[in-house]
Amino acid sequence: MKHFQNERVWGLGWGIEATAIHPSAYGSFLGVLGFLVIFRTSGAYGRFIKGAHDVDAMKVAYFEVAVFVTSFLKLSKKEPAAKKKFHYDIIRLLSLLNALCYSKLGDRAKTTETRLASLQVIDLDSLDADSLDALKDEKKHQVLLVYTWIHSMITDAFCDGEVKMIPVPAPVCGQILAKLSGGYEKFEDCRQTALVPFPFPYAQSTLWLLVLHWFVCPFAMCHLVAKVEGENNRFGSVFLFTLLQVFLLWSMVLTAAQLENPFGEDPNDLDLAGDQDTFNTRLAELTMPCIQVKPSYSTKSPIQGRSSLGDMFDKFDFKVEDEYDSDEDGVAYTAARALLG
């Protein structure tokens, strides 16, 4: 275009005057368009951060339910076999509940085969046939169904005759149920983020203004570069400024479109499958024998000395493992899975 403009060979009377666009007019148009694009990108990033926070809060709430149950079962006078069964069943159901929550957070709440295949559940194959049939029949309400199962199990354990499975006062048991309901509320917040799209009129107006800018920008650059540099052969400058403007604005809009739903399957979305693996590992670790043992110190003197964690690991020849390592081949996870089995 710059070459045609300089040689005046593009159409009748085509020249520098024909492509004249006032810098103030083009600057105003570009400023309005830039504001719209930046605002949408900022809103999309806010949705992404909120979704990441809500999904992490949901997972933490479910894990705290498992921790509460693990701690309070020590006080029960029930048979050890009955306590273990109740403990393991709660852990298995929490793993199933968290996986079902993740499965409902796909693009427009449509669960894909890829998402279902990537979400792992502890001992799902050992669930009884009636419960599996109920889950298959209630495809739209699977999360609510498993949530109700866990709620009922904890309530029954609190009211189970004279010898209770969870022998704690009512306010304490209420905290367990409150944590469980808090996790479900966070799931509903995540669903709102996944289901409620960015306002359609705003997105469409931004898109069409970008298309208009796509056509206007080359003409504007052909004129503005000649004005600024005082020469008519700056083809590289016209190309560079046009490329940067169009590429940057479209990149920001397309990035915002991905960030608006953080629970999809795009490369920039949250790794829900990895989170589920980590959640399963943490749940399984609650069944390890060392979790059931209370720590104690040999000294009775007042608190005086301090030492670093590095000294402790050197003393006992430990290896510092990654806190978020979800490798299922780890020793701790293998031992916990053996107990669950």
Image (tube, helix red, strand yellow):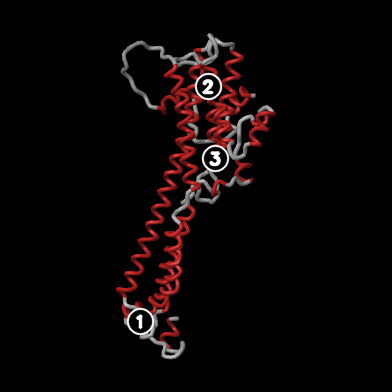
**Direction right: furthest residue:** 129
- The disc labelled 1 sits on which kind of residue? Ala
Q: Label 3 amino acid?
A: Tyr
- Tag 2–tag 3 contact (CB < 8 Å): no
The local crowd at label 1, few if under 14, some if 14 to 19, many if 20 or more residues have their Cα within 10 Å, is: some
Residue behind mark 3: 102
Residue drawn at 45 percent across, 85 percent down: 4
Quadrant holding the C terminus:
top right
Residue situated in front as seen by the camera: 266 or 12: 12
Asked if marks 1 and 3 touch (Cβ < 8 Å), the reply is no
Q: Position of residue 202 (x, y in %)?
A: 42, 59
Sequence-first tag of 2 and 3: 3
- Taking the image as shown, residue 202 lies to the left or right of residue 101, namely left
Q: Secondary structure at mark 3?
A: helix
CA distance separating discs 1 and 3? 55 Å
Image height of 241 relative to 153, above or below: below
* In the image, residue 68 above or below residue 272: above
Q: Is residue 274 left or right of residue 44?
A: right
> Which residue, given by chain and number where applicable, does mark 2 sit on?
154
Q: Secondary structure at mark 2?
A: helix
Q: Earlier in the sequence, mark 1 or mark 3?
A: 1
Which mark is first along the chain, 1 or 2? 1
Residue type pointed to by label 2: Ile
Q: Residue at x 47, y 59 (%)?
A: 254
Q: Which mark is residue 153?
A: none
User: 317 and 197: which one is in front?
Assistant: 197
